[in-house]
Amino acid sequence: MKRVLIISPHFPPANTADMQRVRMSLPYFSDLGWEAEVITVDEQYTDVVKDELLLKSIPTGISIHKVEALDKNWTSKLGLGSLALRSIWFIKKTGNQLLKQKKFDLIYFSTTEFPICILGAYWKKKFGLPYVIDMQDPWHTDYYKDKPKVERPKKYWFSYRMHKYLEPKAMKKVDGLISVSENYIQTLQERYPWLKTKPAAVITFAAFDIDFKIAQAHSEQLSLVYRSEKKINLVYIGRGGFDMKSALTTLFGAFKQGLVSQPTLFENVHMHFIGTSYAPKGKGMPTILPVATKLGITSHVTEYANRVGFYESLKNMQYADGLIIIGSNQAAYTASKLYPYILAKKPLLAVIHPESSAVKIIGDCNAGSLIPIGQTTPIAVQTLADYLDSAYQHTPPTTDWKAFEQHTASSMTKKQVELFNSIIE
């Protein structure tokens, strides 16, 4: 049995997108010949939404090593809020102890707390172990460089320079890359030509049907966010952001035109956008509603900025009349909740970049309707109208579940292990 040490600062019960790959892979590593141990940050040091039910999806017998982090209540006074920077010393210390005590074959960084990844080069030099980095998002990027200040992340000046300095240090000695997007890998290979000789795999987020069983078993303790019983309720659950303005403009523009051309079909529809901000509860800035306001359809749109628990989000999907996915204006962006949307077996509409991998996945599996960002209004209106018909009739997509099998957590874990094996063999 080979052994992998996984570094994932976020881990259940923390409800974050960047721990989902690890969480969904853990049940399958052993059957594929790998024993996994995880180093994570104790949830008391994080300020993300917690969902205790997430712990029910973790197999028994997995060694989880929880470390401390500097208290954000006082580090934030110095302008330091990053979990990566607050926890890196503690992760390094625990990693050193484990790597001295036990034999591991590989170190696997799966996180968007990217500064942690520089420990890979340190441990490789100290213990001679190869390491893999999972690029779930871009690390150092110029995307926000020409954006107005209001659209930039907080402390952008500092984070941009830090990432520009740290990324090459982590990439200089990395032995393999996993990414949700081919574009992320290509960008890194252009930036660091030596990566072209390293194993790399595009592995999207996975479908994990176990989660729906957990949500159903605990349905009574989960709440519904929206209340519009006499309406046709369309639900989107996930982050908002200025990079989704193009998708929203396409969707809302088509909806506005539909109100004029087919009022009977469109007037009774309400769209709910839930959990759109990563900010602490009550402090999230709306990014969906302003677009709806500008297009004059505010009465048909509600934005709930506060994050919700993972299984609460699944219950809200299951009770919806239809589901909506909105995507970034970046082609490389892959919606992390794509597979739960499909598994919910509800009428599904995706408004995403035409070059997004989600377009092919939805199309190949016949899992829903598609409106590419920027599609001309008459075509978009007709697609939207057909989708609303299915929502009114509660007609789920005729999903090709055989084609969908390749996107399940077991299949995605197998792809990870194939890359691991190629590195150590």
Image: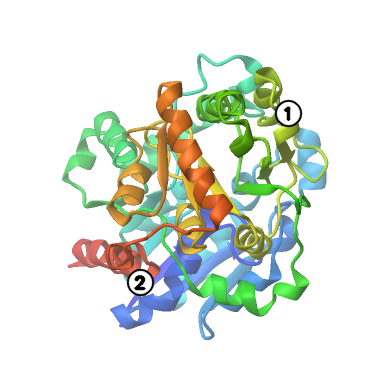
Left or right: residue 321 versus residue 3 is right
Which numbered dot is residue 309? none
Read off the residue under disc 1: 298
Read off the residue under disc 2: 410
Q: Nearer the viewer, residue 33 or 320?
A: 320
Q: Nearer the viewer, residue 223 or 346?
A: 346
In the displayed structure, 27 sits above or below 38; it is: below
Q: Amino acid at mark 1?
A: Thr
Task: Residue at 48% x, 50% y: name it.
Answer: 348
Q: Amino acid at mark 2?
A: Ser
Where is residue 352? Give x, y as percent: 43, 36
In the displayed structure, 289 sits above or below 149; it is: below
Q: Which of label 2 and label 1 is nearer to you?
A: 1
Q: Does any portion of residue 70 appear in the rendered image?
A: yes
Which element is circle 1 on?
Answer: helix
Quadrant location of the N terminus in the rendered image: bottom left
Query: In this figure, which colouring scheme has been used for the structure?
Result: rainbow
Where is residue 397? Give x, y as percent: 42, 57
Q: Nearer the viewer, residue 65 or 328?
A: 328
Task: Residue at 51% x, 85% y: name it.
Answer: 61
* Mark 2 → mark 1, Cα distance in angstroms: 42 Å
Where is residue 334? Give x, y as percent: 42, 44
Task: Residue at 27% x, 62% y: name it.
Answer: 403
Left or right: residue 422 versus residue 116 is left
Where is residue 417? Give x, y as percent: 29, 68
Task: Please rate how many residues cluster around mark 2, counting C-alpha atoms within 10 Å: few if below 14, some from 14 to 19, many from 20.
Answer: many
Residue 60 sits in quarter? bottom right
Task: Please rate how many residues cluster around mark 1, counting C-alpha atoms within 10 Å: few if below 14, some from 14 to 19, many from 20.
Answer: some
